[in-house]
Image (spheres, grey):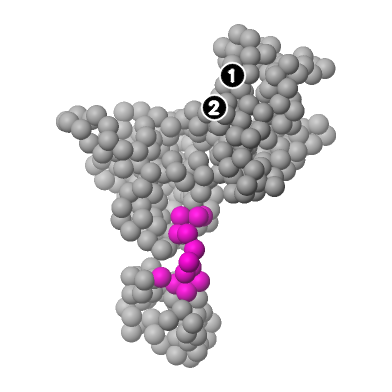
């Protein structure tokens, strides 16, 4: 069935026969791939020919809807009344944090329900959906096409929630699966063969990244550029340790010994996590703020025109990409 090519003049007449009404399939511009994708989406066929043999969860791997600590994991947990099963994970972020789609797809549902509060559901095809709950507002509508990384709403505290956070679910064929497996897929090993675990302080980097909901390869890239993995490094400006913390910043973060790898990495990761939240999950702006300070980024309306900061951002991004690819 996957090898069949439908002539456009025939394809244009077929949506109605299959009960599909879509502006994506119209007249002479009708597309064979679009047709099969829509049939799969409606459950008329098992899958589209272009996706046969491909892992349906691949696009979700390593992509976080928000950056923050995981405050509640997937699986059984004690709730009132009695023991219940938590079908997703909770990520602690301030109310109003931009929430981003973790893969491209079509918005299937936007609305309020008692437990979830305001939620958005996205259909990614091949039976895979994601759900984003307890939102304060939604910026998409049902039927809308969204791209990976696109803002779909803002985090909140609606529904059965005890504090501001995002509840995030992944479902495959209606069955909830642990999002942590996808979120951490690009952490220790990236998408290639080189593992973050093989780097100096790799275990510590991975554990710290997990603690604060960061991509481990990104955190490793920062350490590489900041200090070259030297826990005793001191810059000409006085920044110290793996994450090159200034004394004032270290004190504010509760880092008593900036030369202690665990303390330094914890403080730097926590600070970077906060910057990501402050700048709406924009990694480049958060990196610029880590280097030049958040005030400089706000005043510049973007990455400040400092050669050092611009070089720093590009170096971390390039190293992150390399580690993520495992090359």
Residue 105, how many percent across, how many down?
46, 59
Residue 236, how many percent across, how many down?
82, 17
Asked if residue 57 lies in the magenta stretch, the reply is: yes
Residue 96, how many percent across, how many down?
46, 35
Label 2 neighbourhood size at 10 Å, few (<14), some (14-19), many (20+)?
many
Disc 2 versus disc 1: distance between alpha carbons? 8 Å
Asked if residue 116 lies in the magenta stretch, the reply is: no
Q: State yes or no: discs 2 and 1 in contact (Cβ < 8 Å).
A: yes
- Rendered image quadrant of residue 167: top left
Residue drawn where x is 33% and y is 58% of the image: 173
Total labels drawn: 2
Residue drawn where x is 44% and y is 76% of the image: 36
Q: Main secondary structure of the magenta part?
A: loop
Q: Which mark is residue 208?
A: 2
Residue drawn where x is 35% and y is 28% of the image: 163
Q: Is residue 76 above or below residue 153?
A: above
Residue 305, how many percent across, how many down?
79, 35
Specify start and end residues of the magenta stretch as a single range.
47-59
Q: Does the rendering let one see residue 142?
A: no
**Disc 1 element:** helix
Classify residue 214 as left or right of residue 115: right
Question: What residue did someone put label 1 on?
Answer: 262
Quarter of the image with the N terminus is bottom left
Q: Is residue 286 above or below residue 248?
A: below
Residue drawn where x is 36% and y is 71% of the image: 46
């Amino acid at each position: 069935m996957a090898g069949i090519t439908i002539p456009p003049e025939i394809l244009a007449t077929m949506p109605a026969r299959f009960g599909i009404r879509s502006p994506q399939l119209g007249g002479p511009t009708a597309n064979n791939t679009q047709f099969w994708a829509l049939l799969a989406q409606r459950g008329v066929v098992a899958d589209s020919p272009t996706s046969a043999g491909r892992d349906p969860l691949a696009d979700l791997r390593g992509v976080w809807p928000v950056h923050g600590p995981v405050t509640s994991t997937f699986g059984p947990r004690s709730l009132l009344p009695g023991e219940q099963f938590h079908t997703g994970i909770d990520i602690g972020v301030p109310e109003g944090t931009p929430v981003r789609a973790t893969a491209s797809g079509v918005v299937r549902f936007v609305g309020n329900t008692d437990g979830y509060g305001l939620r958005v559901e996205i259909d990614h095809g091949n039976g895979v959906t994601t759900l984003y709950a307890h939102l304060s507002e939604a910026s998409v509508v049902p039927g809308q096409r969204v791209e990976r990384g696109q803002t779909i709403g803002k985090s909140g505290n609606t529904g059965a929630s005890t504090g501001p956070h995002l509840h995030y679910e992944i479902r495959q064929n209606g069955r909830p699966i642990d999002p942590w497996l996808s979120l951490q897929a690009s952490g220790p090993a990236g998408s290639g063969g080189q593992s973050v675990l093989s780097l100096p302080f790799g275990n510590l980097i991975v554990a710290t990244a997990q603690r604060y909901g960061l991509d481990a390869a990104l955190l490793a890239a920062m350490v590489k550029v900041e200090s070259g993995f030297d826990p005793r490094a001191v810059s000409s400006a006085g920044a110290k340790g793996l994450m090159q913390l200034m004394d004032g910043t270290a004190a504010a973060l509760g880092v008593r010994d900036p030369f202690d790898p665990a303390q330094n990495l914890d403080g730097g990761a926590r600070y970077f996590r906060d910057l990501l939240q402050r700048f709406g999950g924009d990694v480049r702006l958060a990196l610029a703020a880590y280097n030049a300070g958040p005030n400089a980024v706000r005043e510049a309306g973007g990455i400040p025109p400092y050669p050092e900061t611009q070089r720093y951002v590009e170096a971390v991004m390039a190293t992150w990409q390399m580690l993520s690819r495992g090359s």
